[in-house]
Amino acid sequence: MTEIQEYKQSILPKRLEDMKPAMSLKQEVERNEYLTKANILNIMLRWLALNVKGRSLTESEQMDLIIDHFITFCSNLELQEVEFIFREGIKGRYGVIFNAIDIDTICGKDGWIELYYKQDRSKRPEQNEVLQISEPKGEVVTERQFLKNNPEIKRQKKVFELQQKIRDKKISPSKYDLKYIFKLLGYTQQNYFAQLAKIKQDFEQSEYKQHTTLKKYGNERIRNIILSIKKE
């Protein structure tokens, strides 16, 4: 099986002038569409988490729209350029961020992508050398195989999926979800029981004791704990 490496974030130069030739998104998709989308998603989640105004982008449909926009309308960009756009965008370099970072902030008219093309892309060195791309040999890497080969991305995907179910109110989080998320994060069973004990202690000492039950209070605390987990 051909081993396909995950895009390594944050290794891009600080200056566009120092970027080296790399595959375009179009070429990346031709090799492995799923991996390309996963890499764009990881870049987005990492950088948006650094700006509190980026937390308005939480729905999976929002992420899909932005990823599809890059692949459909900006396929000549490279992954390192996608990361550059988000890194500079959250700093406010492509315009003042007033209330929240939304889809149009990134993809819209005078958004981050358009301003990158207008202001910065010309600073890229001319890519005179032709990038030779060898066709992948052997088996096609499926999503299941990719996640098996990349356990950290698999863990992040599971955390994100649980958070999304909670945001969409498809589930009401309970102590079993807390146990599940603690296991994903590598915490011990002792950590889990200690957290439950802390929640119970806080409930007994709070004013909420007069107005709700331990179960309802605990479930709300668990909901906040799970949603507060950020991508590392």
Image (cartoon, rainbow, N blue to C red):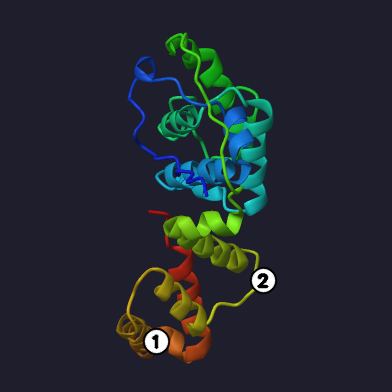
Amino acid type at mark 1: Phe
Separation (CA) of disc 1 from disc 2:
26 Å
Amino acid type at mark 2: Lys
Q: Is residue 148 left or right of residue 12?
A: right
Tell me if mark 1 has few (under 14), some (14-19) or many (20+) residues whose alpha carbon lies within 10 angstroms of its own.
Answer: many
Disc sitting over residue 170 in the figure? 2
Residue 88 point in image, percent of width and height: 42, 29
Residue 129 in view of the camera: yes
Kindly state the secondary structure of the residue where label 1 is placed: helix
Residue 33 point in image, percent of width and height: 62, 41
Q: Residue visible at 55% across and 57% down?
A: 145
Q: Is residue 133 left or right of residue 65?
A: left
For residue 91, which quarter of the picture?
top left
Kindly state the secondary structure of the residue where label 2 is placed: loop
Residue 97 point in image, percent of width and height: 49, 34
Q: Nearer the viewer, residue 28 or 162?
A: 28
Q: Residue visible at 60% across and 55% down?
A: 143
Q: Nearer the viewer, mark 1 or mark 2?
A: 2
Q: Residue visible at 48% across and 24% down?
A: 94
Q: Nearer the viewer, residue 52 or 207?
A: 52
Q: Nearer the viewer, residue 27 or 169?
A: 27
Q: Residue visible at 47% across and 46% down?
A: 3
Q: Which residue is label 1 attached to?
A: 203
